[in-house]
Structure formats: structure tokens, C-alpha cells
Image (spheres, rainbow, N blue to C red):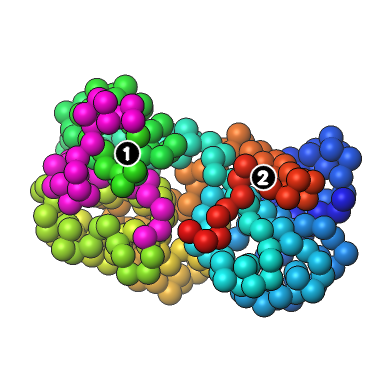
Amino acid sequence: MKLIDYGVREDERKYIEEWAEDNNIEVKIVSDLLTPKTVELANGFDGIVAYQQLPYESSIFDKMNEYGIHVLSLRNVGVDNVPFEALKKNNIRLTNVPSYSPEAIAEYSVTGLMALLRNMKHMIRKVDKHDFKWAPDIGRELNQLTVGVAGTGRIGQAAIKIYEGFGAKVIAFDKYRNEELDKKGMYVDTLDELLKESDVVTLHLPSLGIGNTVINSSTISEMKDNAIVVNTGRGDLVNTADLFEGVASGKLYGAVLDVYENEVGVFNENLMDQDLGDKLLENMIKSPRIIVTPHIAFYTTKAVKNMATISLNSMVEELKSGKSATEIDLNK
């Protein structure tokens, strides 16, 4: 068995190499993304593992079929950048890593919120300039707030446990209710209801498709004054321009954004001293009430190892048995 792994970062390499040695399986490591050009490197291999934020072009799968490769295993959760019709046309099965560390993302969402509630971004900038005055950066306490958790999958459930530990009142919404949370009476009936009742809205939803945002000018107008938005889910859940206006106008207290609808080509790149060419992003970075981080909520040693190894294990299961626990139903 020979596998090829695309888009590999240096922090992933050691886990892939250790897995290859432990399983006595050849894995070619490629730092380049999987594209119609680089897919040619896969000729002669049995399966492809990959991770990237850019869309996977349909012609990649034509080439895979030509090479006799019929499994693509992703090192991440999201599959919205994969054209399912091209997979089905070429009889290619798809797997993902549905859970690499829900706690990592949940913990990060709370970390960002706490930093915002205590005005850490602005205070650190003041201290850097030797301004040690307290005012006007008085904080707020999480135990006094209602936190609305949108999406109660693995990550949302992990977040709920942490928020409850802080003493916050927690409400939740999900199209598919968790039985235990439902017994506790935690759910509200609609997403609109959650937005209206929450002091903090934390998003743990999958992408809802182009143009289907949860946070936009219309929903912001219905939210509580001084509410906070935390997004560690998907960038396209938020109309970022509307969100920025909501903060700038004083309607919203602030926001924590680890994802951004225009993050591709920016996040995880070193653009120091360069013009970003994105005035909205630059304005958010300057704002003391908006915390922007470059899609790192998942970025822990545990999560990176799990992403590297679970994707490879899924590939082996697919090649040996024709089915793995993480195979995606392409007909949904």
C-alpha cells in the first residue's frame, strides 16, 4: 500500500512519519496543495490524503480515476469545498476527520470571549505604551450573562460544559437536538429566539451555503444591545461588514472571530508589513472591541496529531474493507 499526503505543514510531518513507520506503510509527504497539476504526483499511489481551504477542482478527480485512485481522505471536518458530483462521476469515496479535538475549539471560543469581556486586547496595547490607567476598560463577568450556543454537535456540547462551569446561563439551538441537553430544557425553538435572548452568541454550525448568514444587519438589529458574537465555526456564517458596523455603531459590544469569510490567502500566511488589500480586515484588527485570530482554534498538539493519523487510518480502512466509519455519504 502506498499513500500520498498533500498540503502537509511542518507541524504535521512528524505525526505522519511516525504513523508510516508504525504501520509499515509508505506515505509520500507533499507540502503543495492538491491541484490539477500536483495530482500528477499521485500516479502510482493507492490513495490520497489532503487538507486545504481552497476548493478542490473537478478535474482532480478525473485524474484520480485515470490513475485508479478511488479514495480521498481529508485531514479536516469540512467538505463544503469538495464537488460531490465529480466524486460520484469518478467513483471516488470521501472520508474526513469528524472529531479531532472538540475541546480545543470549545476552549478557544471561551478564551477569546474572556479576553474580550476583560478588554485584554486594548489593555495590553495600553500597557505596551506604558499607559497603566484602568479606565475606561472596566470588564464584564461571564457568570452574569446568557450564552447562546448555536450548534450542539461535539464542539457545541464541549463549549456548553465550559460555559456552565463559569456559572453562565446557557441556551442552545440545533436543528437536531441532543437528547441529554433537551432533557435539561436548554433548547430554544428557533435560531432567531436564541439571537434575541443571548448576551453572547457563539457559533458552532457548519456552513449554511453561500449567502446564508446567521449574523447580518437584519439579525443584529434584533439582538440585545451590547451583545457579543463569537465565531470559531465557519467564516461565511457571518456577514463581516454588517458585524463590524454593529460593533462600530455601539449596537454590539464586540466580537471574537477566528474565521473570516475572506481568510483564504491571508490566514496562516506571513504578511508582516504588507498592505492586506482588505480594509475591512484591517479595521477589525485595529478595533479594541474585535479580536481576530487566524483560524487557530483547532491548533493544538492533540488536534494536529489526530487530524494526521485519523485521516490515514480512515484511508487504510477504505482500501482494505471498502468502508470506514468516517466515510461521507455523497448523496446527502
Q: What is the crowding at mark 2: few (fewer than 14 residues within 10 Å), some, or many (at least 20)?
A: some
Q: First in sequence, mark 2 or 1: give its number.
A: 1
Q: Nearer the viewer, residue 9 or 212?
A: 212
| Secondary element type, mark 1 | loop
Residue type marked 1: Arg
Q: Which of 331 and 205 is in front in this view?
A: 331
Q: Nearer the viewer, residue 26 or 279?
A: 26
Q: Specify the quadrant of the image occupied by residue 84.
A: bottom right
**Residue at the disc numbered 2:** 324
Q: In this view, does 82 lie above or below 259?
A: below
Q: Which residue occupies 68% across, 63% down?
A: 92
Q: Is residue 250 above or below residue 166?
A: below
Q: Which residue occupies 60% across, 34% down?
A: 302
Instruction: Indicate which disc residue 119 carries.
Output: none
Q: Which residue occupies 38% across, 33% down?
A: 157
Q: Is residue 127 visible?
A: no
Q: Is residue 75 above or below residue 155?
A: below
Membership of 187 in magenta stretch: yes
| Secondary element type, mark 2 | loop
Give the percent coordinates (x, y) of residue 205.
Answer: 37, 49
**Residue at the disc numbered 1:** 177
Q: Find out whether the residues at labels 2 and 1 contact each other: C-beta distance under 8 Å.
A: no
Which range of residues does the magenta coloring cover?
179-208
Q: Is residue 224 above or below residue 158?
A: below
Q: Gap in Å between the C-alphas at discs 2 and 1?
A: 26 Å
Residue type marked 2: Ser
Membership of 22 in magenta stretch: no
79 sits left or right of 108 in the view: right
Q: Which residue occupies 14% across, 51% down?
A: 223
Q: Is residue 148 visible?
A: yes
Give the percent coordinates (x, y) of residue 93.
Answer: 66, 58
